[in-house]
Image: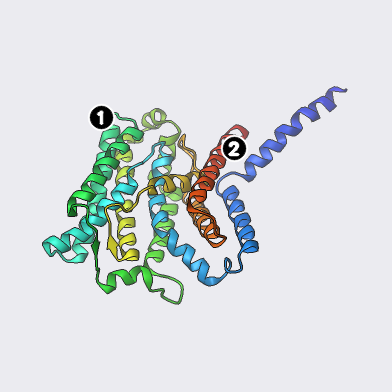
């Protein structure tokens, strides 16, 4: 075999890998996966592509979407936040507990619930930057403490019976399709996308995720930014708790169980790397929609919720494998 033929043979697999890696870059790969899912479920269920079902999917993913927006920043800086589900619960309970036991109006109670979420995020940030705990351990600690506090507020009892104006934020569709909570999620996603793409601080998060020490030497305030990212994640988890309370017309100390895993899954499926430095809001939104469409489509065809958990786990494993492939191809 000639030298030129050998060279062509050796470079062809490399070129194929590079082309495939480019195709899977960013949110393009997840978007292709979302389209494939929609095609599959539309062929197995007559109601999947209906406008009503589409609106149901959007309503159902709003809480997860808000959580995932905060998780995006955390994963971009190379961290992890296992506490968002518990922070959601404690914010839920603060919002229901204060008006019930102390007659505090609902609007101030909502603000205090968001502050509670932010304080939990602040504790996460301090444990990571000051106590030097690994993000996994720090957020696992806050997850346990926040869940306990959520139960302590009302002795483990749920709070029910919110005013109509509050529940209507999640149930009334303006213009026939857009609820206030969905509009809020869309605006937050747009704001997060602009922040990460066009603001210097947003770009600094990628530098921190790529190499914190290099980022520090470049003049980026790594520790303060890390704390603020966790505070933002906590506040968004608190906001997700308010949205969930509006949807359910109740606050429950068990709310948000397992939501942290779904939020991480959405971000990873959307193209972010658990190693840090890679990710984006667009990919996260696609990842959230993939999880929502999966749950919705599998429910429509009668798949058991337990089998759904297995399928979601396989999808996460596939997403991480694709990430590893993409990094090698880059």
* Towards the viewer: 171 or 154: 154
SS assignment at label 2: helix
In the picture, measured across the screen, residue 224 lies left or right of residue 80, that is: left
| Residue 200 seen anywhere in this rendered image of the structure | no
Q: Name the mark on residue 326.
A: 2
Residue at point 51%, 47% (across, down):
312
Q: Is residue 294 left or right of residue 149?
A: right
Report helix, strand or loop for mark 1.
Answer: loop
Query: What is the CA distance from the residue labelled 2 to the residue labelled 1?
Result: 34 Å
Compared with residue 116, is residue 185 higher up or lower down, i.e. above or below?
below
Give the number of marks.
Answer: 2
Closest to the observer, 96 or 12: 96
Q: Is the residue marked by circle 2 packed among few (<14), some (14-19), or many (20+) residues within 10 Å?
A: many
Which numbered tag is attached to residue 277?
A: none
Give the x, y percent position of residue 232: 32, 48
**Residue 103: x, y in percent?**
12, 65
Residue at 30%, 52% in the rendered image: 254
Q: Is residue 201 left or right of residue 102?
A: right
Is any atom of residue 3 visible in this view? yes
Q: Specify the quadrant that holds the C terminus.
A: top right
Say if mark 2 contacts mark 1, CB within 8 Å.
no
Residue holding disc 1: 131
Q: Residues within 10 Å of mark 1 (few under 14, many from 20)?
A: few
Rendered residue at 37%/65% (across/down): 181
Q: Position of residue 202 (x, y in %)?
A: 40, 45
Q: Position of residue 128 (x, y in %)?
A: 30, 33
Pointer 2 or 1: first along the chain: 1
């Amino acid at each position: 075999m000639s030298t030129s033929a050998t060279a062509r043979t050796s470079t062809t697999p490399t070129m194929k890998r590079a082309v495939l890696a480019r195709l899977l870059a960013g949110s393009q790969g997840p978007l292709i996966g979302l389209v494939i899912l929609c095609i599959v479920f539309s062929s197995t269920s007559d109601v999947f592509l209906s406008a009503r079902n589409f609106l149901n999917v959007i309503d159902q993913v709003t809480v997860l979407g808000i959580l995932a927006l905060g998780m995006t920043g955390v994963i971009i800086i190379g961290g992890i936040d296992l506490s968002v589900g518990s922070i959601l619960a404690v914010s839920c309970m603060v919002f229901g507990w204060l008006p019930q036991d102390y007659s505090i109006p609902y609007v101030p109670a909502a603000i205090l619930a968001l502050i509670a979420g932010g304080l939990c995020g602040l504790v996460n940030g301090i444990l990571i930057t000051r106590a030097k705990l690994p993000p996994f351990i720090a957020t696992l600690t806050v997850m346990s403490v926040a869940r306990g506090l959520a139960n302590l507020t009302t002795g483990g009892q749920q709070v029910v019976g919110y005013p109509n104006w509050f529940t209507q934020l999640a149930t009334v569709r303006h213009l026939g399709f857009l609820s206030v909570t969905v509009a809020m999620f869309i605006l937050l996603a747009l704001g997060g996308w602009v922040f990460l793409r066009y603001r210097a601080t947003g770009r600094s998060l990628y530098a921190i995720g790529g190499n914190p020490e290099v980022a520090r030497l470049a003049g980026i305030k790594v520790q303060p930014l890390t704390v603020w990212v966790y505070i933002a994640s906590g506040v968004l988890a608190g906001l997700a708790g308010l949205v969930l309370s509006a949807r359910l017309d109740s606050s429950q100390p068990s709310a948000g169980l397992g939501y942290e895993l779904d939020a991480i899954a959405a971000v990873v499926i959307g193209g972010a790397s658990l190693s840090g430095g890679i990710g984006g809001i667009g990919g996260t939104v696609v990842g959230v929609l993939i999880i929502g469409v999966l749950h919705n489509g599998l429910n429509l065809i009668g798949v058991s919720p337990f089998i759904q958990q297995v399928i979601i786990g396989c999808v996460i494993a596939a997403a991480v494998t694709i990430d590893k492939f993409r990094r090698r191809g880059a």
